[in-house]
């Protein structure tokens, strides 16, 4: 997405230039097949960005690049889209759930509260949840937390019978059922924080955030008090878990580049 106001959004560059926000998806290869965390925009969205909503399309200016969709990147890695057996949704906002129709056979894991919000939105929520993203009838799998403790956070494991340790870590606030997704790997944990924070400097001490991103988070959160509380808990986690948990979010391009660099991937 390339909204106007680079310096006010990315924190650097020119005032008038186009900012750059990405949709960070995570693909996990395991015994269960492929698991995709968030789906960004889908092929239909790229063919017609207006279906994302007039306001969203105008303000965020999503670029029509089909090659960057999750389905095309899965294919480029040599897999079939049907190899993606499970999708985990941090939440169902327009820029996170657009790829659902590209993987119609996958089970879609999420918190029950998010499905409730997306399928029965209030007037305020209607704009963020275009029903076209689930018109195909996804195989929803709703989860509720049962108090399992993960480094001081409540959590629930989505595939309890499998080797893959993938947990929903509720981070309510941005939406009613927003969740982080923790994934265990050889070197520790990855925590996909979705939209629980937008800029990497929000995890620093003292924290900071470019003004437009700060404003957007304040006005676009369903429960802003909880959102701020969860963001502060994440900052505290980031500080006490250095080397153990790698936190990243959905939209900061620098955090994506950092992880790609760590993985040795060229793109
Ligand atoms: Zn988002």
Image (spheres, rainbow, N blue to C red):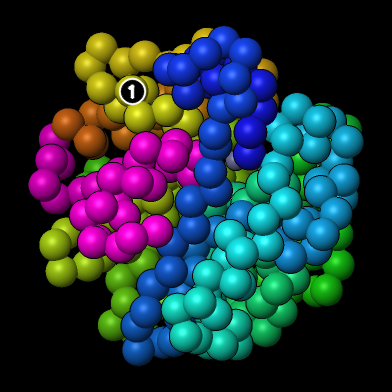
Q: Is residue 253 above or below residue 75?
A: above
Q: Is residue 246 above or below residue 6?
A: below
Ligand 1, image quadrant it occupies: top right
Query: Do we see residue 199 in this rendering?
Result: yes
Q: Position of residue 259 (x, y in %)?
A: 29, 51
Query: Do we see residue 85 in this rendering?
Result: no
Towards the viewer: 267 or 240: 267
Q: Quadrant of the C terminus?
A: bottom left
**242 to the left or right of 221:** left
User: Residue, x 39% and y 72% (percent of image)?
Assistant: 28
Under circle 1, the secondary element is: helix
Towards the viewer: 140 or 190: 190
Where residue 98 sits, quadrant-wise, is bottom right
Within the magenta stretch, is there residue 170?
Answer: no
Q: Position of residue 126 (x, y in %)?
A: 84, 39
Q: How many marks?
A: 1
Q: Position of residue 29 (x, y in %)?
A: 37, 79
User: Residue, x 53% and y 70% (percent of image)?
Assistant: 73
Magenta residues span: 240-267
Q: Quadrant of the N terminus?
A: top right
User: Residue, x 74% and y 65% (percent of image)?
Assistant: 43
User: Residue, x 31% and y 16% (percent of image)?
Assistant: 207
Q: What residue is pinned by disc 1?
A: 201
Q: Position of residue 233 (x, y in %)?
A: 32, 30
Within the magenta stretch, is there residue 245?
Answer: yes
- On whether ligand 1 comes within 8 Å of the CB at mark 1, the answer is no
Where residue 85 sits, quadrant-wise, is bottom right
**218 to the left or right of 27:** right
Towards the viewer: 19 or 224: 19
Query: Dot 1, crowdedness within 10 Å: few (<14), some or many (≥20)?
Result: some
Where residue 48 sits, quadrant-wise, is bottom right
């Amino acid at each position: 997405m390339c909204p106007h106001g680079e310096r006010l959004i990315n924190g650097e560059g020119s005032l008038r230039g186009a900012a750059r926000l990405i949709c960070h998806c995570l693909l996990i290869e395991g015994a269960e097949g492929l698991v995709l965390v968030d789906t960004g925009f889908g092929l239909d969205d790229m063919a017609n960005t207006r279906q994302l909503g007039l306001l969203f399309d105008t303000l965020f200016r999503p670029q029509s690049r089909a090659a960057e969709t999750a389905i095309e990147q899965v294919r480029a890695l040599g897999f079939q889209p049907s190899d993606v057996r499970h999708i985990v949704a941090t939440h169902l906002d327009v820029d996170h759930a657009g790829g659902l129709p590209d993987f119609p056979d996958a089970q879609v894991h999420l918190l029950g509260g998010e499905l409730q919000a997306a399928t029965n939105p209030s007037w305020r929520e209607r704009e963020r949840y275009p029903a076209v993203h689930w018109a195909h009838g996804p195989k929803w799998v709703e989860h509720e937390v049962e108090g399992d403790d993960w480094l001081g956070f409540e959590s629930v494991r989505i595939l309890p019978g499998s080797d893959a340790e993938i947990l929903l870590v509720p981070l309510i606030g941005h939406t009613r059922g927003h969740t982080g997704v923790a994934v265990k790997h050889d070197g520790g944990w990855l925590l996909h924080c979705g939209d629980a924070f937008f800029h990497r400097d929000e995890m620093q001490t003292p924290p900071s955030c470019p003004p437009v991103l700060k404003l957007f988070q304040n006005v676009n959160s369903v429960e802003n008090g909880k959102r701020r509380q969860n963001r502060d808990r994440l900052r505290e986690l980031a500080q006490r878990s250095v080397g153990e948990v790698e936190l990243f979010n959905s939209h900061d391009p620098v955090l994506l580049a950092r992880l790609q660099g760590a993985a040795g991937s060229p793109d």
